[in-house]
Image (tube, rainbow, N blue to C red):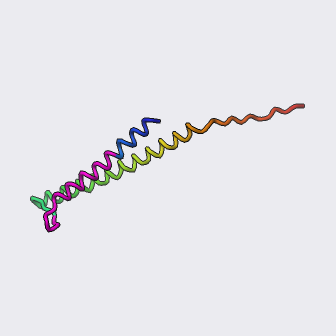
Amino acid sequence: MVSSLVIAIIFLVAGLGLRYWINRRKFYRRSPMGAEGFSSYESSVFIKFIERVGKWIAYALIIFGLLSLWVYSREKKEQQQPEVKTELPTQHR
């Protein structure tokens, strides 16, 4: 049960951290006029492609982390509920 919580926290932090890092790099690449500066066309295409893939990976990590949190909450609810036993009544003849 605790493992799903740990996994959820790790994946959420990793996904959010990756999104932050990509957006920060994009921000600092901009000039005062708002245009992004690249050294060449090839580096522009490559960096934008890698950032796009990185964002999709970050989204996947965040979704997986949220699903793990949901699994953790479901496990916790099941553990807190008392187990109910039903017995069939015996028939007397």
Identify which residue is drawn at 37% across, 42% down. 9
Residue 18 included in the magenta stretch of the image: yes
Q: Is residue 17 left or right of residue 69?
A: left
Q: Which residues are magenta?
A: 13-35
The number of callouts visible is 0
Residue 17 included in the magenta stretch of the image: yes
Residue 21: % across, % down? 24, 51
Identify which residue is drawn at 13% across, 63% down. 31
Identify which residue is drawn at 22% across, 56% down. 49
In the picture, the quarter occupied by the C terminus is top right
Q: Is residue 28 above or below residue 64?
A: below
Residue 77: % across, % down? 55, 41
Q: Which of the two residues, 49 or 37, is positioned nearer the viewer here? A: 37
Q: Is residue 6 left or right of residue 89?
A: left
Q: Is residue 37 left or right of residue 58?
A: left
Q: Which of the two residues, 51 or 32, is positioned nearer the viewer here? A: 32
Residue 72: % across, % down? 47, 41
Residue 68: % across, % down? 43, 44
Point out the residue furthest to the right here. Answer: 93
Point out the residue furthest to the left here. Answer: 39
Q: Is residue 81 above or below residue 53?
A: above
Q: Main secondary structure of the magenta part?
A: helix
